[in-house]
Image: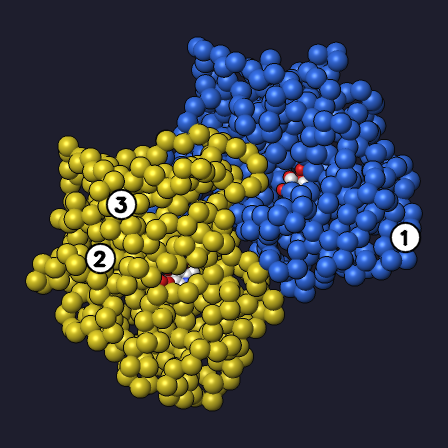
Chain colours: A yellow, B blue
Amino acid sequence: MKEQELAITLSTTKKEKPQADQLQFGKNFTDHMFIMDYMQGKGWHDPRIVPYQPLTLEPSAMIFHYGQSVFEGLKAYLTEEEEVLLFRPEKNFERLNRSNERLCIPEIDVEFALKALKELIRVDRDWIPREEGTSLYIRPFIIATEPYLGVSPADRYKFIIIMSPVGSYYKEGIKPVKIAVETDFARTVRGGTGEAKTGGNYAASLKAQEISEKSGYSQVLWLDGVEKKYIEEVGSMNVFFKINGEVVTPALNGSILQGITRASIIELLQYWNVPVTERRISMQEVYDAYKAGQLEEAFGTGTAAVISPIGEFYWKEEKMVINNGETGELSQKLYDTLTGIQNGKIADPLNWITKLED
Amino acid sequence: MKEQELAITLSTTKKEKPQADQLQFGKNFTDHMFIMDYMQGKGWHDPRIVPYQPLTLEPSAMIFHYGQSVFEGLKAYLTEEEEVLLFRPEKNFERLNRSNERLCIPEIDVEFALKALKELIRVDRDWIPREEGTSLYIRPFIIATEPYLGVSPADRYKFIIIMSPVGSYYKEGIKPVKIAVETDFARTVRGGTGEAKTGGNYAASLKAQEISEKSGYSQVLWLDGVEKKYIEEVGSMNVFFKINGEVVTPALNGSILQGITRASIIELLQYWNVPVTERRISMQEVYDAYKAGQLEEAFGTGTAAVISPIGEFYWKEEKMVINNGETGELSQKLYDTLTGIQNGKIADPLNWITKLED
Ligand SMILES: Cc1ncc(COP(=O)(O)O)c(C=O)c1O
Ligand SMILES: Cc1ncc(COP(=O)(O)O)c(C=O)c1O
């Protein structure tokens, strides 16, 4: 697919931009969106940037019935020098293709998707908020659109990118969250779709999330679906523990999302010569470390919050308060470094940044 | 919600109806559809029958991202006396509510839904095909429509019913299918969404289905996600075995769909005094029965095909041919009885039929 095929139709009206202090995550969208269609036999075609607009689909479109969908989430940042930076965006499109593979959705051209995204950002560049901690959240997604009530991979899809200006996740600096360890519900299992970023995984998580919120926990920590012993990840974050000076995170096992923040944290720790291990880790082991006074820090990692220190776990009717419920030193240093690299305030030693104009 | 609130807008044009011999499952839809909206604080409101038309939704509508959706499938039949019959339709709306509960979707009023469905069928009554084996397939579904990119239950939904005239599943009488036992992939697990009729379960099943089709198997048999030992169900059917004169089906365990055909078969067998047991059954047990010459019949049950005799299982590189690959006596009798009750040709001893005009 060639770049010149990307058609651009500019919006004749412009929406009012929300004030920086009123940005709500994922509620306001920019003036334009990217769309590309797929039809069996024809492949991906008709890539275009158009005014942000509703989608019109048949009520029998497969997305409404059989959940064949994948998505991604990444951010663009405006630097003090008015440059626009993207954090490892090719990783998101590569992961989108891995999700596609699991969901029987045709793969996209990563290079072309990145070009299209850059063009879309250029068109809506003045939507990137400039205040400390703000960014432009980018949501690529693919949905099955074939109008057919049969359980089989669709022959038609839409690949869409929408963008939303978002505020700082933490208004007054990072603040530890409380997490409930889920012992009844499951989000996925070995052989399931856990490694794919697909709607069904999130739909399956709502019930446990709702119950834990009622008890004052902001998210749940999922254990493996088979034995309910081994730690997988948090609702929309991967998870790390600092135990007795060593950083540990669950090894990728097919049912854990391959977080891009997770991978970056591991690379950064290695670059710093901080011991970090990816391995199977049980909740019992974390509990034992806690009891022995060796659980020094715990944190979640993800595009939305970057680093989320965990101040408390609730497991089997017991509360485990970590580091007095305060942000740990390493969590803070990782947050400062990662967000610093992302918004261009500090050097990018591991070559993660893509500039819009590159 | 009161019946009189149901507004009806008739279509000014009528689509051409497909010929009976050209009916494809789930590809043609009638002239009208039912829609009702939900908004938090307001509840379900604005129930209406309108001309069949596309849905217009924001690209950020949650259904496109987080898979919060449920659906149902049932059929209406036209008898030789020109009466319209529904098979246990209240069971479908009750199951829809159980799916709603798991997916954090607000429940619907079963009685009102049934009234609305009957009205919709009345409006599109001339779409019910009259040829032997044909019927009107009915698809109620609910989707999350709130335009918000946050993982939480939506505050807005649409409940929609569309209908599609369908041909006989078996053009030349019932014909045994070949089923591959799935040993790698999982569709759901204990604590997951298996018991709910939600899109994600079907999306998760596509990959295994695609692989087994390539080897000539029409569907897969799912084993439990924990031990990969115990039989759960087929792609879109529950499963029964006749072993040494006794009928056995996996007990409901939270990850198996509570099939309405399944429940009806059990009731019918009990009515006939044929021994039938719901219990945990392993694939090894079925294999051992097969080796001992005691696996007399196997069949799937579901709304689409009613009874699907299973002529062959493929498990761990071995083919198990059942009853010489032919339809068993009990399978045939169950098919004849159930379809006979459904299309009004034989008596309805267990009171399953709802007449449109009741
Ligand atoms: C289930 C899940 N795990 C982990 C993550 C973190 O991934 P990333 O760091 O790529 O944002 C996310 C968010 O994308 C997620 O949805
Ligand atoms: C996964 C699954 N199991 C079983 C069934 C059979 O259920 P029923 O007999 O209610 O159609 C279906 C079809 O509805 C299904 O999708």
Q: How far apart are marks 3 and 1 (CA)?
A: 62 Å
Mark nearer the N terminus (2 vs 3): 3
In the image, B354 versus A255, the foreground residue is A255
Give the residue type at disc 2: Ala
Q: Mark 1 lies on which chain?
A: B
x, y percent for residue B229: 72, 62
Q: Horizontally, is A313 left or right of B275 in the view?
A: left
- Mark 1 Cα-neighbour bin, 10 Å: few <14, some 14–19, many ≥20: some
For the residue labelled by badge 2, is the local secondary structure a helix, a strand or a loop? strand
Dot 3 and dot 1 within a common chain: no
Q: Specify the label residue B305 is tagged with.
A: none
Which residue carries the number 1 mark? B294
Which numbered disc covers residue A2? 3
Q: Nearer the viewer, residue A311 or A352?
A: A352
Per the image, label 1 sits on a secondary structure element best described as loop
Q: Residue at x 79, y 44 (%)?
A: B311
Alpha-carbon span between mark 2 and mark 3: 24 Å
Mark 1 vs mark 2: in front: 1
Is A35 or B125 nearer to us in this picture? A35
| Residue B42 against residue B8 in the figure, above or below | below
Q: Which chain carries label 2?
A: A
In-image side of A261 versus A77 (left or right): right
B2 shown above or below A270: above
Look at the numbered disc 2 and say if its residue's Cβ is closer than 8 Å to ligand 1: no
User: Residue B142, position in %: x, y?
Assistant: 49, 37
